[in-house]
Image (cartoon, rainbow, N blue to C red):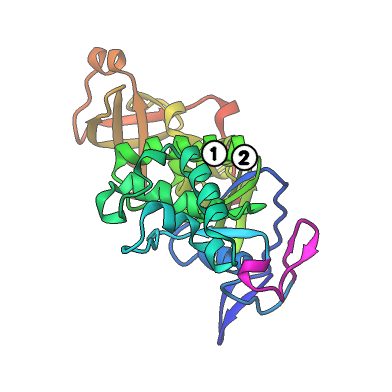
């Protein structure tokens, strides 16, 4: 599918299949087309060309409520004057479901997200994580076949983000439905997804399992955006990527390429050594505590970089 805004192409011939019951993360920088793609799936944007099939049915002409999807927005968009119970039940109310039935279904969803005891509270009386779970329950109450999530964790602090991330994966596994989750966080995508779809300039740059996309990036953009890689130009090999945890530091004059130590940061489980290449390239190596104690490094020191041949990834745009 393609989406144009005037002369600008926001999504360019996106060709993507998501198997039923898959947790898919659309990942990429701001402006890459991931949120526009999600909105087209939801029916909040109409594609300029192409088809959208959900459960093998063409849904392009259907309004959001008829697509079998539900969307959870970044802002949660809870009604401040309604209780948790009535927020969750609101979409059922709009469909004409009776009060007793819709409240029963809403309580069932609140039970799923472990908030049944707070059913009578207003959103302002809840923490950010609790509001997020109410929004999730509201999205799930219509029994969608696909849940669409637009950066649902971005408003949470790091500790709560990790906890809610685990809950999202548990909900998806227990419900057995497809989740399509937009994020710009590599950690989020790697932790949650069965399928990672990395986007750039409205196109799919690479897709696969989290391990495939992280461990075997196909382009320099993929390697740099996923993080944890050094992208290095080798005269005999073109452009290659090697993981920072598999980049070895050697004495000056040894190794494959030379570098200058820019700084050393303690990470809690080791040290991250920031490096500058001969042409100003920014590289990094992860070093264990014992190794750095045995051979301390100082800014300005010259070192060599090496690796095992099996750890090199040859990049398509470096041939």
Q: Residue at x 28, y 44 (%)?
A: 157
Residue at (72% x, 54% y) in the render: 17
Q: Check if residue 153 falls in the magenta segment.
A: no
Vertical order, 226 against 174 (above or below): below
Question: Which region shows up in magenta?
Answer: 51-66
Residue 140 left/right relative to 244? right
The quadrant holding residue 282 is top left
The answer to which of 274 and 76 lies nearer the viewer is: 76
Q: Along the line of sight, which residue is nearer the eye, 311 or 265?
A: 265
Front-lying residue, 61 or 279: 61
Q: Is residue 43 left or right of residue 28?
A: right
Label 1, label 2: how many angstroms apart (C-alpha)?
A: 6 Å
Q: Position of residue 304 (x, y in %)?
A: 37, 29
Answer yes or no: is residue 278 visible.
no
Describe the element under mark 2 as helix, strand or loop.
helix
- Estimate how packed mark 1 is, as few (under 14), some (14 to 19) or many (20 or more) residues with alpha carbons within 10 Å: some
For label 2, the residue is: 175
Secondary structure type for disc 1: helix
Q: Percent from the top left, x then y, of residue 303?
A: 32, 29
59 within the magenta span = yes
Q: Which mark is residue 234?
A: none
- Residue at 58% over, 75% down: 45
**Residue furthest right in the image:** 56
Residue bearing the label numbered 1:
171
Residues under numbered marks 1 and 2 in contact, where contact means CB atoms less than 8 Å apart: yes
Question: As rendered, which of 183 and 28 lies closer to the eye?
Answer: 183
**Position of residue 115 in the picture relative to residue 290 (left or right):** right
Question: Above or below — where is 28 with respect to 257?
Answer: below
Height in image: 101 above or below 292? below
Residue at the spot 70% in from the left edge and 57% down from the top edge: 16
């Amino acid at each position: 599918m393609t989406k144009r805004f005037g002369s600008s192409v926001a999504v360019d011939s996106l060709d993507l299949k998501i198997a039923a019951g898959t947790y898919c993360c659309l990942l990429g920088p701001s402006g890459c087309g991931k949120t526009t793609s999600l909105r087209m799936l939801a029916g909040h944007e109409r594609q300029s060309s192409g088809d959208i099939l959900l459960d093998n049915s063409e849904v392009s002409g259907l309004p959001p409520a008829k697509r079998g999807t539900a969307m959870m927005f970044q802002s949660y968009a809870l009604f401040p004057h309604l209780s948790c119970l009535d927020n969750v039940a609101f979409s059922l109310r709009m469909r004409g479901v009776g009060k007793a039935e819709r409240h029963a279904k809403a309580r069932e969803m609140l039970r799923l997200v472990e908030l049944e005891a707070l059913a009578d509270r207003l959103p302002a009386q809840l923490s950010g994580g609790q509001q997020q779970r109410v929004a999730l329950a509201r999205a799930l109450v219509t029994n969608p076949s696909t849940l669409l999530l637009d950066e649902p964790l971005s408003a949470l602090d790091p500790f709560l983000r990790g906890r809610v991330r685990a809950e999202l994966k548990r909900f998806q596994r227990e419900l057995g439905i497809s989740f399509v989750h937009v994020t710009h966080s590599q950690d989020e995508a790697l932790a949650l997804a069965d399928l990672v779809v990395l986007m750039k300039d409205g196109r799919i740059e690479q897709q696969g399992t989290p391990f495939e996309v992280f461990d075997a990036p196909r382009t320099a953009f993929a390697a740099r955006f996923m993080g944890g890689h050094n992208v290095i130009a080798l005269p005999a090999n073109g452009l290659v990527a090697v993981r920072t945890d598999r980049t070895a530091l050697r004495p000056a004059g040894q190794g494959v390429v030379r570098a200058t130590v820019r700084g050393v940061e303690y990470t809690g489980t080791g040290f991250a050594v920031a490096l500058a290449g001969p042409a100003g390239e920014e590289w990094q190596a992860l070093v264990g505590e014992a190794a750095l104690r045995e051979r301390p490094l100082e800014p300005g020191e010259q070192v060599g970089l090496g690796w095992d041949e099996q750890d090199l990834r040859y990049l398509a745009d470096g041939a």
